[in-house]
Image (tube, rainbow, N blue to C red):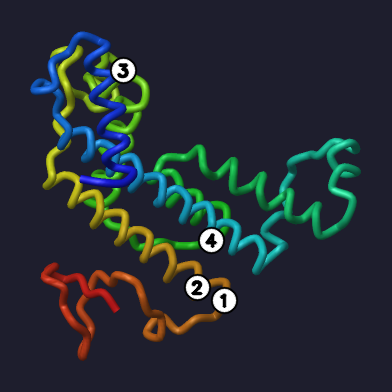
Amino acid sequence: MRGALAGATLHLSIAQFMLGRKPRKFDFARRLRAQELVMLLAHFDAFMADSVRAICKGAPDTLKRSKTLTWEGILQCESWDNLVAHLIEEMAFSFGWNSARQKIEALQKEFGVVVSANEKDLVTLETAEQFRHLLVHNDGRVSREYNKRARKALRIGTPIDISRRFIDEVTSAVSMVASDTFIAVATKFFSADPASLTGIWRRNAMPGKIDRKKKGVTIV
């Protein structure tokens, strides 16, 4: 094992040794899956924020809100283009605080974009977001807040189960919801023909396309 992964593994081993934990008790596979989960959601959040940026740049009228900006803030922008860019970033930043489900709802409420994401994918993303919160703030262990939000009764302090199967489910959900969003935004704001869009996942197989072993899903 070489490169950045080897260096990160070495640092983790040293940290565990300093904490008095034996290396054989350290679950590297689980740590790697945890990192994969966090990065999957990070990429999803970034894509959704970029979708909002694309909407605002393609249709500046969507920036018309009842929000206010100080004179100082306006002057710091120095030009109209910089001001618009600043407003777009503020919009994307505010949008980013939403959960995956709230993002989908906000796209419809704020921009009229109807994303055909299914409930199963949204539930998977909600679970992944709850897991991410535990990984970042509680070393991946069950908390009272998690039990309350997830309506569980798990033992406090128990490590959450991050299986390879769950990571695959999150990967699929991220791919599908991102593709659904891409199609919805492209057709509404950029007059795109849905059938001509490529490099995306589709929920229903289309004639002449290659099915990648996912029932009812085709990548084109």
Q: Position of residue 15 (x, y in %)?
A: 29, 19
Measure the alpha-carbon separation of dots 1 and 4: 14 Å
Determine whether label 1 and label 2 are within 8 Å by CB.
yes
Q: In this view, does 144 lie above or below 62?
A: above
The amino acid marked with disc number 3 is Glu
The residue shown at (21%, 24%) is 151
Of the image marks 1 and 3, the number of the one nearer the N terminus: 3
State the residue at coordinates (57%, 53%): 110
Q: Which of 136 and 12 is in front in this view?
A: 12
Residue reaching furthest bottom? 208
26 relative to 98 in the view: left or right: left
In this rendering, the answer to whether 14 lies above or below 31 is above
Position of the C terminus, as image quadrant, is: bottom left
**Viewer-nearest of discs 1 and 4:** 1
How far apart are the two marked residues, 2 and 3, measured between alpha carbons?
Answer: 38 Å
Badge number at residue 190: 1
Q: Name the residue under label 2.
A: 186
Q: Which residue is drawn at 50% across and 81% down?
A: 192
CA distance for labels 3 and 4: 33 Å
Secondary structure of the residue carrying numbered label 3: helix
Of discs 2 and 4, which sits in the foreground? 2
Residue type for callout 2: Ala
Q: Is residue 46 depicted above or below 12 in this figure?
A: below
Q: Residue beneath label 4, please?
A: 112
For marks 1 and 3, give the CA distance: 42 Å
- Upstream in sequence: badge 2 or badge 3: 3
Q: Mark 3 points at which residue?
A: 145
Q: Residues within 10 Å of mark 2 (few under 14, many from 20)?
A: some
Q: Where is residue 216 in the image (x, y as percent from the top left)?
A: 16, 71
User: Where is residue 62 drawn, in percent x and y?
Assistant: 67, 59
